[in-house]
């Protein structure tokens, strides 16, 4: 659904709020759940304070409702409640929702729907669905820019000063569509812009707002249905055997194919591939950001459009087609998903979710050009340096995606692993990207065995990340991918450039217990972390070919290092997280869902 056709904000449903903190930064939340509906006697009313552990904040609000109902039925056993007959409601002060209360749905999560120490009411479904349900006795005017409570008895033809058209939000500026000459930077300033029309207060929203909400409800229903279908495929998928070997993937069920996106649509969304929308540039072409595409469901983070330079030739088109084939066959939580593709002869493009955290390379080096790219992604001020825990988390995520590619049948080699091809989202998760150079290692003709390497006549990769095996023997393998990952680990440890880095760190790699001396001071590396990471670099990239550490052996050690670093952060180790023993830890996203759904939060 193209919501921009209704001239509404691209992604605006609530007043601007700060981005949610990362999982390892979020603390427990305390809320008050109240049951005081008029249909129940006063003796049956109940108010319960619940402290939600951090791991609950990304689960459905239905878990909160179930916890309250269980506690209520234990206290009022003579008149128990049926949780399926009730819904949760919270007060909604947003001027764009046209209601004073908001009924929570199964897809809502506490991290976004609730706030610390807020009041949540348990109400029957009939009351929750009643039109015009409000916590206030006085109606609120639904006209754009008014939103005040009024007395119907004193309402007159000049009582309401409002705007005729909805607001628009573009980057940092905001304005009313009917008053484009006045642009402001904050939501409070926007609400203070004088209206351009006068009339009665109205409790009914404007017609264009009704149409926008209808379109949004339909789009949300389609996305939720796709989410459930993806979850069904995930739980029916074959699991690894007792030895930990991944089964041959069912590519048809593992990943939905990318949608076809017309070139005209991409040109319009990127303002004609304007320089102001460019967020990156590489050997293949350039990357532009856009907020919405009619051919794809809307995602909160926006889209990144990777486009080939005009006249790139057959080589660039072949690499793009290879990337499409690779990503269509692969499905992993930390492999950047391909959402759409345009193979127009005039300009070939790929569409991904926009990773607003930037690349690991930009976050580490923080050069003027890197900071400019981060500003294009939404950072009004330079972000703080990544901590050691954040760096380990990103490296762990990318390494797990790379290992996944190596375990497929046939095996897929990335061949261009680097800090620039590891992207971060707003939560600090890492994603392995730019697999345009990836290639399946085909079995030799007439052989049914899986080969461990492939020969190549072309040299791929970035200077400093290329394994000498590639330049000397012309062979790419899991070891050469592991070598590039080892260099990426060393870059994350030191914050230095890749060229000549092994020679610069010779002494520390020879004696890893001295690696703290080469660690970046702004990351807060401990001596133990630096030593273990240096040992992984030695195993992956420093040893001779026959003595190198396989990625399958390095990954568990990297995961243990990342988990130990996260456990040291107080927000993850509080008592609130241990309130409910035995609860299974769940992922932030349902990675089995179609690619268009994964980043919808």
Image (spheres, grey):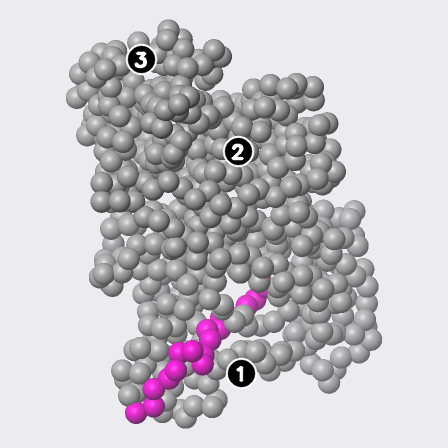
Q: Nearer the viewer, mark 2 or mark 3?
A: 2
- Residue drawn at 35 percent across, 60 percent down: 56
The answer to which quarter of the image holds residue 215 is bottom right
Depth check: 139 or 466 in front?
466
Q: Does residue 13 appear anywhere in the picture?
A: yes
- Which corner quadrant holds the N terminus? bottom right
Report if residue 55 lies within the magenta region: no
Lower position in the chain sequence, tag 1 or tag 2: 1
Depth check: 391 or 338 in front?
338
Measuring from the top left, give residue 538's x and y in whole percent. 24, 19
Find numbered disc 3 in the image and state the secondary structure of the residue it sits on.
helix
Label 1 Cα crowd, 10 Å radius (few <14 / some 14-19 / many 20+): few
Spatial distance from mark 2 to mark 3, Cα to Cα? 35 Å
Residue that label 1 marks? 126
- Residue drawn at 32 percent across, 65 percent down: 51
Residue that label 2 marks? 325
Spatial distance from mark 3 to mark 1, Cα to Cα? 68 Å
Measuring from the top left, give residue 222's x and y in whole percent. 58, 59
User: Is 336 located above or below residue 15 in the figure?
Assistant: above
Q: Which residues are magenta?
A: 78-95
Residue that label 3 marks? 502
Mark sitting on residue 560: none
Find numbered disc 2 in the image and state the secondary structure of the residue it sits on.
helix
């Amino acid at each position: 659904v193209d919501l921009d056709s209704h001239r509404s904000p691209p992604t605006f449903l609530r007043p601007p709020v700060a981005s949610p903190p990362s999982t390892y930064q979020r603390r427990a939340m305390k809320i008050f759940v109240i049951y005081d509906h008029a249909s129940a006697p006063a003796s049956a009313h109940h108010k319960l304070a619940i402290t939600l552990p951090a791991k609950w904040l990304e689960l459905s609000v239905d878990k909160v409702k179930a916890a309250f109902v269980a506690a209520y039925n234990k206290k009022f056993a003579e008149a128990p409640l049926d949780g399926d007959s009730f819904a949760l409601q919270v007060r909604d002060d947003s001027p764009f929702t046209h209601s004073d209360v908001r009924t929570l749905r199964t897809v809502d999560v506490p991290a976004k729907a609730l706030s610390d120490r807020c009041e949540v009411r348990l109400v029957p479904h009939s009351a929750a669905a009643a039109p015009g349900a409000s916590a206030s006795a006085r109606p609120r005017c639904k006209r754009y820019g008014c939103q005040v409570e009024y007395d119907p008895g004193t309402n007159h033809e000049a009582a309401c000063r409002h705007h005729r058209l909805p607001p628009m939000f573009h980057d940092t500026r905001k304005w009313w569509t009917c008053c484009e000459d006045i642009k402001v930077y904050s939501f409070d300033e926007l609400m203070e812009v004088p209206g351009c029309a006068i009339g009665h207060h109205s409790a009914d929203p404007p017609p264009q707002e009704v149409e926008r909400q209808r379109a949004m409800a339909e789009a949300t229903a389609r996305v939720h249905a796709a989410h459930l279908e993806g979850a069904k495929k995930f739980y029916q998928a074959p699991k690894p055997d007792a030895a930990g070997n991944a089964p041959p993937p069912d590519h048809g069920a593992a990943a939905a194919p990318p949608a076809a996106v017309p070139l005209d649509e991409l040109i319009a969304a990127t303002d004609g591939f304007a320089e102001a929308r460019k967020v990156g540039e590489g050997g293949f072409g350039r990357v532009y950001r856009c907020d919405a595409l009619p051919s794809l469901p809307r995602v909160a983070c926006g889209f990144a459009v990777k486009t080939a330079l005009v006249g790139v030739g057959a080589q660039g088109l072949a690499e793009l087609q290879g990337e499409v084939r690779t990503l269509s066959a692969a499905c992993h939580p930390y492999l950047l998903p391909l959402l759409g593709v345009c193979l127009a002869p005039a300009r070939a493009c790929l569409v991904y979710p926009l990773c607003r955290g930037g690349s690991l390379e930009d976050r580490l080096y923080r050069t003027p050009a890197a900071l400019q790219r981060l500003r294009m992604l939404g950072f009004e001020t330079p972000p703080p340096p990544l901590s050691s825990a954040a760096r380990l988390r990103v490296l762990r995520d990318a390494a797990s995606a790379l290992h996944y590619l190596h375990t497929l049948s046939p095996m897929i080699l990335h061949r261009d692993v680097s800090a620039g091809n590891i992207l971060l989202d707003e939560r600090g998760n890492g994603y392995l990207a730019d697999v345009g150079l990836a290639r399946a290692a085909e079995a030799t003709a007439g052989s049914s065995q899986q080969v461990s390497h492939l020969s190549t006549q072309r040299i791929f990769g970035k200077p400093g990340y290329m394994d000498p095996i590639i330049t000397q023997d012309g062979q790419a393998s899991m070891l050469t991918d592991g070598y590039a990952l080892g260099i990426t680990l060393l870059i994350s440890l030191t914050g230095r450039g890749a060229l000549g880095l092994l020679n610069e760190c010779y002494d520390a790699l020879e004696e890893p217990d001295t690696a703290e001396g080469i660690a970046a001071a702004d990351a807060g590396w401990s001596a133990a972390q630096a030593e273990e990471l240096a040992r992984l670099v030695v195993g992956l990239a420093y040893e001779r070919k026959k003595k190198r550490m396989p990625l399958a052996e390095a990954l568990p050690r990297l995961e243990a290092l990342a988990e130990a670093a996260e456990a040291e952060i107080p927000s993850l180790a509080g008592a609130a997280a241990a309130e409910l023993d035995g609860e299974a830890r769940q992922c932030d996203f349902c990675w089995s869902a179609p690619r268009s759904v994964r980043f919808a939060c």
